[in-house]
Image: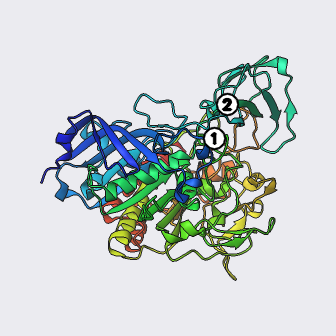
Amino acid sequence: MIRSFLAAALVASFALDATAEVTRVDVKRTDVGMSGYEKVVGTIHFAIDPRKPENQVIVGLDKAPRNTAGLVEFSADLYILQPHVASRGNGVALIDVVNRGRKMTLNSFSRGGTLDPATEADFGDGFLTRQGYTLVWVGWQFDVARGNNLMGIDAPRAMGVTSTVRAEFTPNDRNPNATVADLVGYPVSGDGSDASLTVRDGPFGEPQDIPKGRFHLKGAVVSLEGGFEPGRTYQLSYRTQNPAIAGIGLAAFRDTASWLKHESSAPSHPRYAIAFGSSQSGRFLRTFLYQGFNTDERGRQVFDGVMAHIAGGARLSLNESGATPNSLGMYSATWFPFADLALTDPVSGKKDGLLEKARARGHAPKVFYTNTSVEYWGGGRAAALVHSTPDGRANQALPDNVRAYFLTGTQHSPAQFPPRKPAAGQQIENPVQYAWTMRALLTAMTQWVTSNTAPPASQHPQFKDEGATIVKASEIPFPAIPGVQSPRIVTPGRDHGRSLPLLVSQVDADGNERAGIRLPDVSVPLATYTGWNFRSAEVGGTKELVALSGSAMPFPATKAKRAAAGDPRLSVEERYPSKDDYLRRVREAGAKLVKDRYLLADDVDPIVARAGEMWDFVVGSR
């Protein structure tokens, strides 16, 4: 049966139940035919009751304008891809938290994706569409520059409120002008004469005030006489009036999913909803869960499953005055509580857990936390605190509804292939492709949600009486590879002034991590793969990390080259008799991961093909 919604979409808009939180959807366009899918694009309108406890947690909502019914109105961009024939769907809506306005799921799972999928190629290899997922995106971030298919929200404003906003940036050159992207959503109050600019060395150096006469502010662009010093950290702050109520994005995400699951007027009627968020969006989901938004205004559970990807133990600056959701949150994105179960903070004595608030406990979904080496090592995201005690001294059990997976030896987003050294980094980037494991885990989450089939066991570094796979970063026995700076100097993040435990996976003699889901790239290696990459001398700050980057240090091709370089790692020819032998080992490693459900059988062949390309890259150039 073909969906009837398409005919309704020919009208400019359609009204919904007057008592619903979603009040209207204006459809701008629809398309049919791509991979048997139809596209619904428009604007979704909301009206929420600020008096209800499910909404009272939203900071500033009490200062928002109200309609005659006492409700707060706002709207957001909406984008849906759904099977054109309803019977071909799998009954699951995969609702993507857009990342700075960008759609992520097709790229993350189908190895395709654009901001506006319009051709078969945009669906990548068709993994998601073959499974029959309904794919949904809704804008939630108030300061996204709309246009060019970026998605955002028109948030109400906290009237009569004056806030001080601030943001940090580290320039890579001496350009005299810097756009502080984290503050673009905040107009400067008055003439900006009370703005301040400081500079310091490193993330926690002593800040120095820059005289007001040396810098000038125009919107979010700050100009500095003589130019900025590359590698140093600057902080800009100023006053703004009537700021946007940033936390309203949490309600928009909640109510869109609830509308699809429960309202007859929605274009799709999935039985289940799984939320996926990557990086900034993964931090959004950890914030969403902690603040209890998985219960809607009518007391119903919203998401059945949540996949918070590459968020570490961090949350998002969103539901607060002067929120900066665009920020990477380098060294400051992680604050107590870190884990799901209630634990005691050894510093403040406070007891809390991500899923322990009454509203969160009532409708806790099934949860996957997936993290790369970057979230353990860099940016202060402290991923180990998801499964360790707050003092960093012992394992912490996960709730029965939660799994944590460490994607061993990978970086935040896999580098392009063949890999190359970024302008800001000392080493070539890490190209280990973990999308294959993410596909297997999405399959497992779907089975867990729809049929209660238990997912594969958590895989992450652990404390043990013998053979511990977790270690302090400052004590890691990383090999002395020529031209590679020791990672033992990495700076940990901070939570309200105190340093967080910086715990990472133990490594083997090659410097490759031992814990977690070890893809064939890592278990049958041609290089040392890390979740850290130090800034190059060209951009300054050589003891600081390149944001979200990892490294690949290929092995010497031959024993003679190893000896000449003084490299402690065995060469490729000392490890593998031939390329065929190497690829055989890769296939065997992949088959074991399939058996353990961390890979899908269909994805072993492309993994072997990439391994062959990596062999040619390493042996041919070294």
Q: Nearer the viewer, residue 157 or 313?
A: 157
Q: Left or right of 39: which side holds 62? A: right
**Label 2 Cα crowd, 10 Å radius (few <14 / some 14-19 / many 20+):** some
Can residue 35 be seen here? The reply is: no
Q: Residue at x 38, y 68 (%)?
A: 444
| Amino acid at pointer 2 | Gln
On screen, residue 149 versus residue 506, left or right, reads left
Counting from the top left corner in percent of width and height, residue 346 is at 79, 69
Element type at mark 1: loop
For the residues labelled 2 and 1, the Cα–Cα distance comes to 15 Å
Name the residue that disc number 1 marks.
324
Instruction: Say whether residue 397 is visible.
Output: yes
Quadrant of the drawing holding the C terminus? top right
Callouts 2 and 1 close, C-beta under 8 Å: no
Q: Nearer the viewer, residue 526 or 167?
A: 167
Quadrant of residue 118 within the rendered picture: top left
Where on the picture, by quarter, is residue 168?
A: top right
Residue 200 % position (x, y): 82, 36
Residue beneath the point at 51% across and 46% down: 249
Give the labeled residue for mark 2. Answer: 241
Residue 238 at x, y percent in the picture = 74, 30
Q: Position of residue 558 (x, y in %)?
A: 56, 53
| Residue type, mark 1 in image | Thr
Q: Secondary structure at mark 2?
A: strand
Q: Residues within 10 Å of mark 1 (few under 14, many from 20)?
A: many
